[in-house]
Image: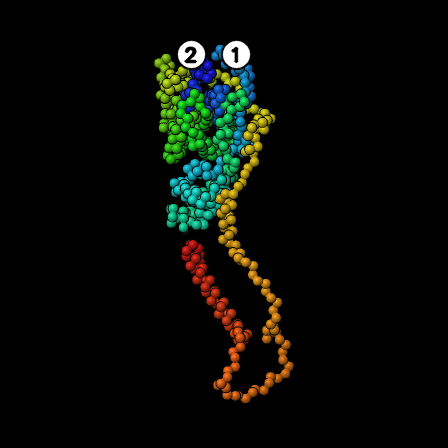
Amino acid sequence: MNPVEGLLIARGPRDLFLLPRMANRHGLITGATGTGKTVSLQVLAESLSAIGVPVFMADVKGDLSGLARAGGPTPKVAERIQKLKLKDFPFRESPVTLWDIEGTQGHPVRTTMSEMGPLLLSRLFNLNDVQAGVLNIVFRLADEDGLMLLDVKDMREMLKFVADNAADISNRLGRVSAASIGAIQRALLDLESQGGDKLFGEPALDIEDLIQTDPQGRGMINILAADKLMLQPKLYAAFLLWMLSELYEQLPEVGDLDKPRLVFFFDEAHLLFTDAPPALLQKVEQVVRLIRSKGVGVFFVSQNPLDVPDIVLGQLGNRIQHALRAFTPRDLKAVRVAAETLRTNPKLDTEKAIGELGVGEALVSFLDEKGQPGIVERAFIRPPWSQIGPIDPNLRRSIIQGSVIYGHYEKAIDRESAFEILRARAEQRVAPPAPAYPPPPVPYPQAPAPASTRAPRDYPPPAEQPYEEPRTTTRAPRPAGRPRETMFESMAKSAVRSMGSQIGRSIMRGVLGGILGGKR
């Protein structure tokens, strides 16, 4: 069959092809550890890339980077090629773009606090309903005031602003408690201590950079280094879900295409759904249901089909089920669910076969031309064309430096945002207002020195003059200005003014303290 018409993924009693037209109908890859899920993921990715479909996947074990290097006839691979009778098997590499939140194993990948939004951040910070409500208020205020929340320091400064104005904000938008603000601040501190703050900043990831092809027309395989990211499972799940949301919001409607614009593999999918609140599950279900019309296919990869909620599981038409080991009642239930969700093959006991599958063997069911699930078949996944296992650091470095986007994401940008604007406003409130015009220069005093500084008189005062009756016809003119105060009068008035201003300051402290909730 022509590769554009069908991609050979597995071979059993018959060849099993993934139809490119049905690759955006989503899929599921499940199986216990060590049963071959990573190889299945690798085979799907390189097959899609070969027909010009870009791929995004998270490399949680560090093995998927081998896609960038051609494989070889190792003993196990040669044995599988011979067993499946694959003639003229081509060993070749695929075009790869490497990404890494820390920027060490790939191009730095970032988003902003505003783009991630309060729902995903609440999940990331493990907030309860009340604390999540306060975080919603924080975002509402930032939007109203045109404040961009780009990185952690922007969010911290915004939380400080909300705490300082909690009384007024509570009257307008709802109660903002110091305990809720403190919980969010502690979550930010914990995020920083684990290095998760590197995810937030600019330049943010441009989704269009994921939808690229190489000069030969092959789709780029975008690999996110997630071995360290997996140590923060909620950050990992929040970031991948943000990427899905961005794809859904930014890409235009295209309907059914001959092949997808992008296929997104969500490895360790159980991290997304474990303890997820209903609002988040509703968002995931909405994105998975509607993103097909944007030309994007989503494959969830997990150990157990029970990890995926029913509302999502029902939309995953392409299935690769590797072996499951039933050691507990939950394992037995998982085997039964996996068997029941596959289209029955009258020649195959599906439930029994799930426990008997070997490494690299799977129960496969792909959608046919009409979009109906194919009859499940027991088959072996074909060997990958590329290397199984990670590449060496030198090759990784050369791939990064040879990328067309090298240098764009490597340099972080810190433009004016909420942190700078709120700090500037605070400084303006504290600093005294500058005079509108410079004060006039003070002239050199020409008046005589005060009486207290004059030299003491060494002669007796003149004799007292006799009293004379004032004249009624003429009156001596009143001297200009106010009579000079004596030293005792000045001291008395100064004391009165001091007492008055002290009483005034006490009254003002009392009034402002009552308004702002401060202590007197």
| Label 1–label 2 contact, CB within 8 A | no
Disc on the earlier residue, 1 or 2: 2
In the rendering, at what x and y percent does residue 131 appear?
41, 42
Q: Looking at the rendering, which quadrant does residue 405 occupy?
A: top right
Q: Position of residue 85 (x, y in %)?
A: 49, 11
- 59 up-or-down from 192: above or below: above
Disc nearest the viewer among 1 and 2 = 1
Q: In the drawing, what numbered circle is on residue 66?
A: none
Q: Residue under circle 2?
A: 13
Q: Nearer the viewer, residue 33 or 274?
A: 274
| Marker count (numbered) | 2
Determine crowd level at label 2: few under 14, some 14-19, many 20+ residues with C-alpha closer than 10 A: few
Tell me, yes or no, if residue 322 can be seen here: no
Q: Could you tell me the amino acid type at mark 1?
A: Asp
Identify residue for label 1.
Answer: 88
Q: Image point 51% across, 18% down: which residue?
A: 384
Residue 461 x, y percent position in the rendering: 60, 84
Describe the element under mark 1 as helix, strand or loop.
loop
Task: Give the residue displayed 54% in from the left and 22% down from the top.
Answer: 215
Rounded to the nearest whole Å, what is the CA distance between mark 1 and mark 2? 20 Å
